[in-house]
Amino acid sequence: MENIGIVAEETADLPQDIVEKHKIGIVPVALHWPGLELIPGENTFQKMRELTRMGIASLGKTSQPSPRDFLLRFESQLQRFKEIICITFTSAHSGSYNSAVLAKKLLEPEKKEKICVLDSMNASGGQALVILKAIDLIKSKKGMADVVEVLQEFIERVHLSVMFEEIKWLEASGRISSLVANVVRGMTRLGIRPVLSIKKGKITPVGLRSKARDIPAVLFRQFEKETEKPSRQGKKIRVVITHGDYPEGARRLREDIESKFQNVEIAFVNIINDILGAPTGPNTLTFAWCEI
């Protein structure tokens, strides 16, 4: 039996090869969108584009994993590992953390002691970076208490930036008002787009970028700005890029970063999960980074 295992939701957007290599227990997330299965497309984003083309105004609803979903993964992982760290999607936008905590309470006393639930205070690539840090710490043979202590401090140093192509999906989800959406549409027509980030676990606008019709180029400039100090100091930086069925944009962002920065490791590039993707829509692009 191995020492420490990991449980996380699909919201971390981890590639399957990483999940399998490190035996990570993945908790599924649900998207309830009646009739979506009848729409052509290989993924949710392609189906959303098709809905737009067809002139159908529709939006799905996401739901957090239940305590039972976490309980099943805890029980399964405890057959492989002596102890478990569960790293959840930010509690500011989901009840996943609470579901995981409740699942832990439902276990027998001797099993409860073997599980620690951590709120990543992040999403998508940001959550993934916390998991990758946990993997590094576990590989270094640190004990559970030491791993948790380092992660709790590390979580505050993970950065995530997001840009989306169209505001209508956020508007349809009810996360912003029609008034705000119309203001953003007006700015977009002028080539101005908002950049979103994670602050204290909550997705928050952090600025407006002009000449922003080219999302990969804007996010590259954002990355340059955010990492200027650690890059100047020669610090090693780990990056995760995720996208809303926008592989070309993700490829360009990756190539731009790798061509300029010698101190950057791109951990992976992957498609965004439905929890973040449904309200942000196709061609959304994100990067998450941290010092390592």
Image (tube, helix red, strand yellow):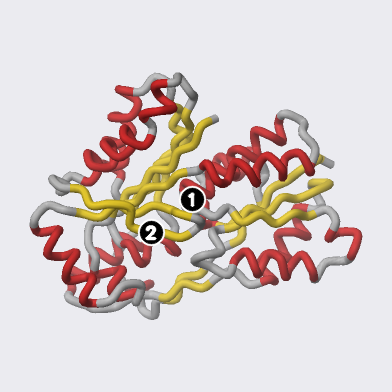
| Mark 2: amino acid | Thr
Provide the residue designation for mark 1. Answer: 13
Provide the residue designation for mark 2. Answer: 204
Going by the image, does 278 lie left or right of 188?
right
On the question of residue 245 being in view, the answer is no
Going by the image, does 53 lie left or right of 251?
left
How far from the left and from the top, in percent, is residue 141? Answer: 77, 31
**Which one is closest to the eye, mark 2 or mark 1?**
2
Dot 1: what SS?
loop
What residue is drawn where x is 83% and y is 53%? 114
How far from the left and from the top, in percent, is residue 19? Answer: 59, 45
What residue is drawn where x is 71% and y is 31%? 139
| Picture quadrant of residue 219 | top left
| Mark 1: amino acid | Asp
In the rendered image, the vertical position of residue 171 relative to residue 290, given as above or below = below
Nearer to the camera, 36 or 156: 156
In the rendered image, the vertical position of residue 283 relative to residue 184, given as above or below = above
Q: Which mark is residue 200?
A: none
Question: Do labels 2 and 1 touch, CB within 8 Å?
Answer: no
**Residues under labels 2 and 1: Cα distance?**
20 Å
In this view, which residue lies farthest toward the left? 190
In this view, which residue lies farthest toward the right? 110
In the rendered image, the vertical position of residue 143 relative to residue 79, given as above or below = above
Going by the image, does 92 lie left or right of 83?
left
